[in-house]
Amino acid sequence: MARMTELTCKLTCVPLLCGVIFLLGSTACTNTSAKVENTEATPAPLSLPVMTVRMDSTSSSKDYTAALEGKVNVEIRSQVDGYLDKIFVDEGSYVKKGQDLFKINDHTYQEQLNTAIANLHMAQANMSTAQIEVDKLTPLVRNNVVSEIQLKAANSAYDAAKASVEQARAAIASAKINLGFTLIQAPVSGYIGRIPKRLGTLVSKNDAQGITTLSDIEEIFAYFSLSESDFLYFNAHNKGNSLEEKIRQLRPVSLVLADGSIYQHPGKVDIVNGQFDKTTGAIVLRATFPNPEKLLRTGNSGKIRMEEFYPHVMLLPVSATVDQQDKIFVYALSDSNRVKRVSITVTGKSGTNYIVSDGVQPGDRIVTAGLDNLQEGTAIMPQDTLGARQGAAMVNK
């Protein structure tokens, strides 16, 4: 009886034990599955490059369209009317001051001079006749032979004849000047421009277009314009108590030629126009460049490149920023490697970097790529943590 009771107990316990084992196995599977699901629901932090903000030196440049002119740019015109008889120079040739350039037919002006000389001789003869009359009447008046009125009339006639002589001499001088104007000479040394007139062309002092232009290009003037805002920035950020002093202390400027190359000689801004142009709202500045190789000519175009040096500024890559409306943001990294969007103040641009004055501090870390995937408070894995620590150490030093 006792053995049957023991057997019955064993048979009863086996199913119970199996049930317990099944329940424990099921619970373990459920926990394992939950762990797998939790692991899949929590993605790994993004691995993004990070840089440390630090102070640096840089320069920023800005280009302004410029028009070039020779130091002396003279329009050669005729001062008398006549046909062009001779052309002594060719287009583009170099001439010296006083060299003959053009000859206008002078027959008319030579005859005018001859006429003036003949009139002088006639006036001198009339003056001699009037002098004889005065000499004749003077003793007669003294002896009361003739009245004093006759002598006064003779003296008046003599004065009129003398005035005619002076007038004739002035006419001769004027005729000589006009005759001299028929030979046009170079007023300065320089290069001849285009000559649209040809031999036999009738030229006049009233022509809308001159005969040619003559340029002295030992030095070249480059004229460029600053907008009102640029001029105010220029006035505020350059040292000096007056505008003239600010200009004297400006750094040399560069000239960017039409092919994109930089002219080998630096220039100097030396003058500012006295007023703004009402139509464009701009003010004109002038920079002077030496031109020993005569590479630059009047009429060339180019760009004035003005550079400004910044000795201690923060530089951030443009690619590490986000523009939104009128503000610029970066993603700064906290000690827990979570990002925070921060607005920065940009004062200029140098190459591919922004010059920043506010919003971040030296030693701050910012994300430099992958910004489209970031949101406020996102945790990341910095790719350049060592570099960030080294940058921070350099700032602390």
Image (spheres, grey):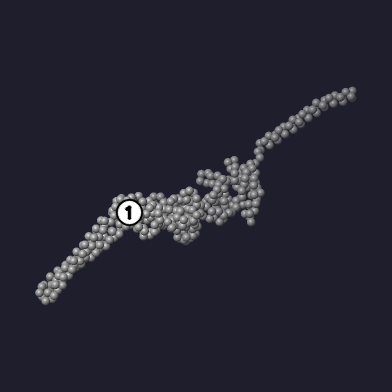
The residue that mark 1 highlights is 86
| Quarter occupied by residue 160 | bottom left
Residue toward you, 236 or 183: 183
Question: Residue lying farthest left?
Answer: 145
Q: Residue at x 44, y 50 (%)?
A: 301
User: x, y (%) of residue 320?
Assistant: 57, 46
Is residue 190 found left or right of 363 in the rendered image? left
Q: Residue at x 24, y 58 (%)?
A: 111
Question: Helix, strand, or loop for circle 1?
Answer: strand
Is residue 378 found left or right of 263 in the rendered image? right
User: x, y (%) of residue 318?
Assistant: 55, 47
User: x, y (%) of residue 164?
Assistant: 20, 64
The three-letter code of the residue at mark 1 reads: Lys
User: x, y (%) of residue 283?
Assistant: 42, 53
> Does residue 284 show up?
no
Quarter of the image that includes the N terminus: top right
> Does residue 353 show up?
yes
Q: Residue at x 87, y 25 (%)?
A: 6
Classed neighbour count for the residue bearing mark 1: other residues with Cα under 10 Å, few (<14), some (14–19), many (≥20): some
Is residue 295 found left or right of 23 in the rendered image? left
Residue toward you, 64 or 139: 139
Residue toward you, 328 or 164: 164
Is residue 342 found left or right of 73 in the rendered image? right
